[in-house]
Structures are given as structure tokens and as C-alpha cells.
């Protein structure tokens, strides 16, 4: 009661708001003082409070004062007015369903996979391309048709609403400016002003003669932010007809209509169908593919069938047979590293992250295995591309090795004796068949 006595008197009194119901005058009598309750009610008679003074939650509407509701019920009532009469204790409590563990789940936990049906391996599981041309899509609306439709909707809404009177406008502005305490508003996000200043050139922000203007602009942004919050709260509370009646506001100002025209997109249905199809049957975006790419580029990206460094450090020159033996040794070493290291590492990924692909396995013996086959076909294509990349890089290194003497020994001008001081690559023996003498 003492706190209520100290509440400030509203700035706008009843004398400025004509036509509103007021309190009857208190009976006068000798030796009688005005009641404290009468004084409190008299203070709020001009502008009844719209927000609660004290509550467990911030920005709680005053209409919750007369109800005995928990904070959760109060929040639910204001978030969804249709649920204003619901109580948490009266809600039906659903029992959690008992999970049913099938054989396939048991196999997945033990690391075993369900056996695949050989009869359905070749049958498709909806992998056919969606036929989106069976029915012609509706013709997109033109900009004029969109504008006419928006104007029609605005006219229909104007029929059930009216223009606010001067009293309505006065009381509406009062509640926006003085009906909500500053501590009830959410503070401005810390990074919002930083994002705004990033849109302004730094030369303008650093200019000394614009610092006063910059300060005023920041204050204006903060003022507009607080005003927009107050207006949104008041508009949402006044959606309740009982609150409008209690606050003596018949109509509220209508916001300026936002008319956005969308460009005609006759391919919208086609795009949606293709997007749904790709989400179901396109496996290149699966996380498994990214793991395989990371493994290849991090661990095996520098692997070659022909090691250029070893060829250059060999005991050159070599006979053709020795050179062939060295190249075959390099190829065999690369083959063994791929077989013993690369393949097991990739297989380990499928075991550790089987939750990313085990849903593709058919649940029943008669179901199709086309989805899981398509998934592993995509994996095989990716790994084949990686091997092809390794082969191409190996051939490029092999070609670079033979291009050591690409310039030849034909020279012009002054002879540089150090130019041709480099080891030979190979020793070639020529044999004359007629004389059978080795050259």
C-alpha cells in the first residue's frame, strides 16, 4: 500500500481526456479524510496501467494481475491468446512411448549389418527422375495482379477496422511514451551499432567536423530502437479487445502497408521438385564424402606412383632394364600403401560414422537396396577420381624427369661449358645387326 501511494501521478490527467468515465466525488463530511484506496484509484483513473509494476518476469501486462497464474501460464496466455483459459495442471499428460527395438537395431549396435535381399538389388527404390511435367504448373502472377491482390486485402481489412479518434491517438501515444518503464525493455544488442557503423565509410566516421553529427545519429538510433520496442509491445497488448475496452482505446493507428512485389518465377515448382529429389538421392553432400576428401588431401595427397625425388637421387645413368625395375618398385610401393593404409582408413570412417548412412539399408528382406547401392556408387566414384588425380600427377612428375635434357645440345652464340654438365638419364647401347658389333 505504501508503495502504491508513492506511485507518480500520470502526466495526462482526465481534464485533457474528455468523455471518459470517472469516479464519483467522495462524500464530504466534517472530520473525514479521503481514503488511501480512493487516492490510488484516482491516480490511475485517467490512464489505467497497462504493465504490472512488479512481477517475476519483465514486461508483464497488467491484465494478468487479476488471474492466479504461474509465470509459464502467463507467458503462454500472452504468446497465444487462444490459450488464455488453459491451465498446466489441467493439460493431458502424455505417457512416453516405449521404444521398440527391432532386429536391425540390434545388428547395428553389434556392428553387423542386416542381410540384403538378392532379389531386390536391381529394383529401383524411387531413384527414377521425378516427372514434373505431368501437370502444367499454375501461371505466376504478374506484378499488376499482385498489387491488385494486396490492395483488395487492405480494403477488406479496412472494412472491419476504423480510424482512431483524437482521444484514441492521445491515449495510444501516452502508453507508448509513459506506459512502459525503461527497465522493461530489452537492451540494444551490443553488435548492432557496430554493424551500422560498418556500413558507413571510415573517412566519414573519422572526420573531426562530423563527430557531433555522429553522436546525434547514434542517439537517434537508440531512441528509434526504444520507440519501436514500446510500440510493438503496446500493439500486441491492444490486440486483446478486453484490454482496448479497459484502456478506453477503440481503434489503434494502422501501420503503413508494406507492399512487396515478387518477380514472376515460372520455375518455382520445378525448383522445388528438383530440390526435394536432390535431398533424397544426391549423396555428394553427405558428411562421409567430406571425410573421405579430408583423408585424401591430408594424408595421401602427395603420394605418387613415380617418385621424382628418388629418380633424381638414383645412381644415374641407368640401363633401360634397371630404370624399368626402379619404376616398377615405386609403383608397387604406392600400391601397397594404398591397399594397407588408404583403404583401411576409409573403411574405418564408415564404421565410426555409420549413423550417416545406415538409414539407407532396407529394413525388410523384400525392400530394395537401390539407395544404399547408389550411396556406395557415389563413394566409389569419389575414390576413383582421387586415384585418377594421383595417376595424372605421377605422369606429370614422370614427364618432368625426362624433360631435364629438353633443350638439347644445339646452342647459338657463345658456348657455356657449364650448361651441359648434368648427369645422363639412361645408357643406351646400339647394336649393328650386320656386323654384330656393339657400339
Image (cartoon, rainbow, N blue to C red):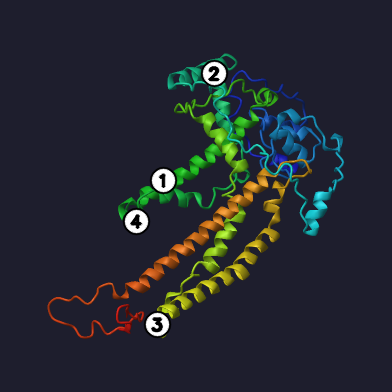
Q: CA distance from mark 1 to mark 4?
A: 14 Å
Residue 343: x and y, percent? 62, 64
Identify the residue position indicated by label 1 in the image. Answer: 217
Foreground mark, 3 or 4? 3
Task: Give me the residue at 72% from left, 21% from top.
Answer: 24
Quick one: quadrant of the N terminus? top right
Disc 1 element: helix
Report the residue at 12% width, 77% height from top: 413
Q: Of marks 2 and 4, which one's residue comes earlier in the chain?
A: 2
| Real-space Cα separation, disc 3 to disc 2, in angstroms | 88 Å
Tell me, yes or no, whether the two marked residues, 3 and 2, touch with CB atoms within 8 Å. no
Give the spatial CA distance, label 3 vs label 4: 71 Å
Q: Which residue is mark 2?
A: 153
**Furthest-top residue in view?**
159
Q: Say whether disc 1 or disc 4 marks the residue closer to the N-terminus.
A: 4
**Quadrant housing residue 124:** top right
Q: Residues within 10 Å of mark 1 (few under 14, many from 20)?
A: few
Residue carrying label 3: 318
Amino acid at each position: 500500500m505504501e508503495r502504491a501511494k508513492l506511485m507518480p501521478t500520470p502526466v495526462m490527467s482526465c481534464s485533457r481526456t474528455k468523455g471518459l468515465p470517472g469516479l464519483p466525488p467522495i462524500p464530504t463530511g466534517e472530520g473525514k479524510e479521503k481514503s488511501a484506496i480512493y487516492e490510488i484509484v484516482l491516480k490511475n483513473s485517467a490512464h489505467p496501467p497497462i504493465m504490472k509494476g512488479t512481477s517475476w518476469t519483465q514486461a508483464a501486462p497488467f491484465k494478468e494481475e487479476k488471474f492466479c497464474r504461474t509465470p509459464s501460464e502467463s507467458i503462454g496466455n500472452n504468446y497465444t491468446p487462444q490459450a488464455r483459459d488453459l491451465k498446466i495442471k489441467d493439460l493431458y499428460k502424455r505417457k512416453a512411448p516405449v521404444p521398440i527395438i527391432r532386429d536391425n537395431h540390434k545388428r547395428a549396435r553389434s556392428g553387423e549389418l542386416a542381410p540384403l535381399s538378392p532379389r531386390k538389388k536391381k529394383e529401383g527404390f524411387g531413384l527414377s527422375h521425378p516427372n514434373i511435367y505431368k501437370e502444367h504448373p499454375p501461371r505466376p502472377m504478374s506484378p499488376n495482379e499482385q498489387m491488385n491482390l494486396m490492395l483488395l486485402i487492405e480494403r477488406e481489412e479496412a472494412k472491419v477496422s476504423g480510424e482512431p479518434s483524437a482521444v484514441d491517438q492521445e491515449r495510444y501515444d501516452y502508453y507508448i511514451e509513459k506506459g512502459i518503464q525503461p527497465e522493461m525493455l530489452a537492451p540494444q544488442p551490443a553488435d548492432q551499432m557496430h554493424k551500422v557503423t560498418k556500413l558507413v565509410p571510415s573517412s566519414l566516421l573519422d572526420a573531426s567536423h562530423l563527430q557531433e553529427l555522429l553522436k546525434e545519429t547514434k542517439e537517434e538510433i537508440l531512441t528509434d530502437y526504444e520507440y519501436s520496442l514500446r510500440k510493438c509491445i503496446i500493439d500486441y497488448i491492444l490486440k486483446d479487445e478486453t484490454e482496448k475496452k479497459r484502456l478506453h482505446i477503440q481503434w489503434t493507428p494502422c501501420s503503413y502497408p508494406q507492399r512487396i512485389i515478387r518477380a514472376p518465377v515460372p520455375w518455382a515448382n520445378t525448383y522445388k521438385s528438383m530440390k526435394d529429389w536432390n535431398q533424397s538421392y544426391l549423396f555428394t553432400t553427405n558428411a562421409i564424402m567430406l571425410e573421405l576428401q579430408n583423408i585424401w588431401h591430408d594424408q595421401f595427397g602427395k603420394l605418387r606412383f613415380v617418385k621424382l625425388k628418388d629418380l633424381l637421387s638414383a645412381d644415374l645413368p641407368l640401363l633401360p632394364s634397371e630404370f624399368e625395375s626402379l619404376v616398377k618398385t615405386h609403383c608397387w610401393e604406392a600400391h601397397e600403401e594404398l591397399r594397407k593404409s588408404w583403404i583401411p582408413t576409409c573403411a574405418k570412417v564408415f564404421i565410426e560414422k555409420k549413423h550417416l548412412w545406415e538409414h539407407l539399408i532396407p529394413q525388410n528382406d523384400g525392400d530394395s537396396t537401390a539407395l544404399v547401392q547408389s550411396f556406395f556408387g557415389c563413394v566409389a566414384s569419389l575414390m576413383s577420381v582421387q586415384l585418377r588425380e594421383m595417376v595424372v600427377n605421377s605422369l606429370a612428375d614422370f614427364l618432368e624427369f625426362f624433360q631435364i635434357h629438353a633443350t638439347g645440345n644445339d646452342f647459338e652464340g657463345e658456348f657455356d661449358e657449364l650448361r651441359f654438365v648434368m648427369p645422363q638419364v639412361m645408357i643406351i647401347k646400339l647394336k649393328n645387326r650386320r656386323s654384330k658389333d656393339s657400339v
